[in-house]
Image (cartoon, helix red, strand yellow):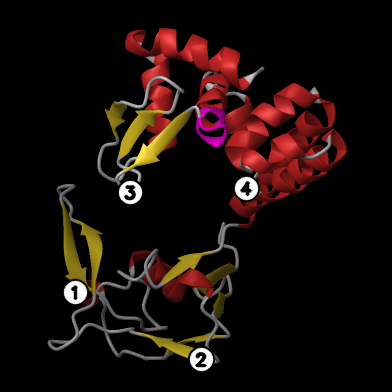
Amino acid sequence: MRTTKVYRLTNDKKPLSFTLSSSDSPRHRLLGKFTEENGDETYRAIRYARNQNTPFVHKQQGDIIREQIVFEDGTLVVPEWNVALQLFMDVHPGNGVLFYEQDHVKEAKEEFDLMNMELEAQNFVKNADPKTLETIGLILLGDYVREVSTDILRRDMMVYARQHPFDLMASAEDPDINIMSIARMAFSQKHMGLRNNGRDIHYNFPDVKKKLLTVPLNADPYETFAAYLKSDDGVELFNVLKQKTLE
């Protein structure tokens, strides 16, 4: 059963009018994917003609009635009776590139999933104990969370939950969140240090200042250090830093 379809320009573009290419020509090829009788897929010339029941030029017969295809304010509404245009839009090479078909059911589901995740993230922040909030806040908001009250931290985390619910829940469910938190506190409390423009990680203990690691190119130094702490070689240092950072 045919229904009215709505097409929108990609990237939320909304010009007063936009005319879509509607016919193949030697200078401006317009090809759509066509399935041959043997099942092979190929690309054939397409053309929109409102009095034809196919967009493929080699299948069209008789006189051709041409019409422009114009998006207004970034939107094109094609009623259910205009089957020719709907078929043409389906095979147009700009489908998914220049424009897309609006899917209300899909959009509703995505919006519901987002709202559901926002609610889950906010409930997590509301019910989490202060230490858990601080641990996650160190990763998402930075070192300042150790200096503010629990109420301020919970408020800021609630704002973050509304704006970035998926990121917050990913951190909350990350089994390595404590390691990452210790890694960040090791630097903020100056037990460890970065040198050479952030490329080298050094000890910053009173009696030990030597280099520990080189950060790979384009890698995050905190993630690199956390990965080291998680390894067999880093277990001993992790235990030392855990005691120092939580003192």
Which of 86 and 158 lies nearest the eye of the viewer? 158
**In this figure, which residue is indicated by the disc labeled 3?**
197
Does residue 220 appear in the picture of this structure?
Answer: no
For badge 1, the amino acid type reads His
**In this figure, which residue is indicated by the disc labeled 2?**
17
Please tell me how crowded label 4 is: few (under 14), some (14-19), or many (20+) other residues with Cα within 10 Å.
Answer: few
Location of the N terminus by quadrant is: bottom right
Is 137 positioned to the left or the right of 78 in the image?
right
**In this figure, which residue is indicated by the disc labeled 4?**
110
Rounded to the nearest whole Å, what is the CA distance between mark 2 and mark 3?
A: 50 Å
Residue located at (79% from left, 26% from top): 130
For badge 2, the amino acid type reads Ser
For badge 4, the amino acid type reads Glu
Dot placed on the residue nearer the N-terminal end, 1 or 2: 2
Specify whether residue 241 is painted magenta: no
Mark 1 vs mark 4, foreground winner is 4
Mark 3 vs mark 4, foreground winner is 3
Q: Which residue lies furthest to the right in this view?
A: 151
Which of 134 and 84 lies nearest the eye of the viewer? 134
For badge 3, the amino acid type reads Asn
